[in-house]
Amino acid sequence: MKNNHISALQELFYNALSMQWDSIDRLPASGSDRIYFRIRYKQNKSLLGVYNPHIAENRCFIEYAQHFSEKNLNTPCIIAVDASSLYYLVEDISSVDLFSSLTYANKNKDWNIQTLSLIKDSLRALVNIQIEGDKGLNYKVAYPVPEFDIRSVKWDFNYFKYYLLKPKGISFDELQLEKDFETFAQWLTTNHIEAFMFRDFQSRNVLIKESKPYFIDFQGGRKGPVAYDLVSFLWQVSANIPASIKEELIDFYLVELGRKVDIDTHDFKSKLPGFVIFRLMQVMGAYGYRGLYERKPHFLKSLQPSFCALNDFLQNHKLPILLPELERILMLLALEGKVVKNDSNRLNIQVCSFSYLKSGIPKDSSPNGGGHVFDCRFLPNPGRIDQYKSQNGTDSEVIQYLENQKEVHKFIDSAFKIIDASVENYLERNFTNLMISFGCTGGQHRSVYSAERTFEHLKEKYDVDISIEHVMKDHWISNH
């Protein structure tokens, strides 16, 4: 398939520039289905070749880019498009994005004048593309919808509910939450300054060339509230812009916006918290889908910082409208961020026993997305012996029975070797979470015994924070 892409791009390149390229290299994959290639020609010149199977998305990006180029806005130029609209060539702006500058500023606690200047130039350019780009823009080609409406808002709410709340096992009043969603959606889509809404305006989509910002990945743009883009940028979780700088940048943005349209700055600022909450819900829903549902480690790891960001925000802001059930849920998620944020850098190990039959493998609430899962079902089962059925893996008679079995000793020794290697590596690398789970058929005898042995072993051998949980404890068969 790769060769097919290269052949198609080679033909498109030759037809557009009447020459052969010097080289073509596939760029690292992103979160989308788009495949990017960097094409080099005439020694130091380059452009990007793009393949995307979603034709409607391609046509939207291409028409938007052509419109913005005609208005001299900060976006790349389209060089050529093939007849199928599956492939196109676009200007190669830069390999340097604004996120790199923000990462450096965070790491070194150095939000200097140069970095702030880049951010302000980006916000000034944002205002231009929002207001000037909106004029005469053909929203009929918008992908997937032409405007920020109640329907599209509810899509994001459903991601939040079905890919974050439900997989995490957070209980909620379905009817009341839906009422809150209705109220919130109405508020988000009513009485705001609207123009071109970039939709994914964040620092990774701002490329820097000769100290000037350029924008990419605007194919999700639509007619909508301009405040959404400001919030997406300033509250980008991984950018971690300090609160004091956020305030300065909000004021700067409002001055620039005020040059283009009439605004009530007090009203605009009072509505920002609503958009921040919505954006964080959207991000958590997307991370939940990629992390909790698709089990992609990068997105799973990104969930916890979003809980921390939510916790930080709710400590100083309130929802602009009454949303009781949603607010309760948000406070629960914020609490997860608070717990993790207040932890030290010590390694936290969680040991669990569970039942494959009745509970399934426990989910890891830490950013790591899981750890070791050991299957104990092949070991001799005390639960099949009448005198042990009402006991569990913490009872002395069951312990004695299992420790008389050679298979159990081999299993425990092998498990300890794997676990010890992980713990020592995690300690060396300053990791903070490790989950170790043991499962058997009923979650009462073999898995409980193994978890207890592991808990005691780690407690004696390592200076770590360790806890143990028997998932099926309340359901153990007992004579009492």
Image: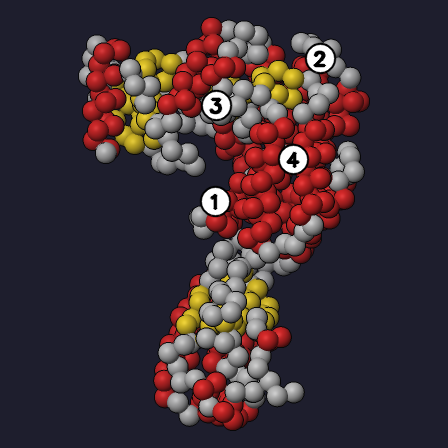
Kind of residue at disc 4: Phe
State the mark number for residue 422.
none
Q: Is residue 167 visible?
A: yes
Residue 207 vs residue 221, the one in the foreground: 221
In percent of width and height, residue 260 lies at 67, 9
Quadrant position of residue 123: top right
Kind of residue at disc 2: Gly
Q: CA distance from mark 2 to mark 3?
A: 29 Å
In percent of width and height, residue 351 lies at 53, 70
Mark toward the start of the polypeptide (4 vs 1)? 4
- Disc 4 target residue: 278
Q: Is residue 460 left or right of residue 52?
A: right
Q: Secondary structure at mark 3?
A: loop
Residue 408 vs residue 252, the one in the foreground: 408
- Disc 3 target residue: 143
Q: CA distance from mark 2 to mark 4?
A: 24 Å
Kind of residue at disc 3: Tyr
Q: Secondary structure at mark 1?
A: helix
Question: Is disc 3 surrounded by few (<14), some (14 to 19) or many (20+) residues within 10 Å?
Answer: some
Total marks placed: 4
State the mark number for residue 258.
2
Question: Is disc 2 surrounded by few (<14), some (14 to 19) or many (20+) residues within 10 Å?
Answer: some
State the mark number for residue 290.
1
Q: Residue at x 78, y 34 (%)?
A: 321
Q: Residue at x 32, y 13 (%)?
A: 80
Mark toward the start of the polypeptide (2 vs 4)? 2
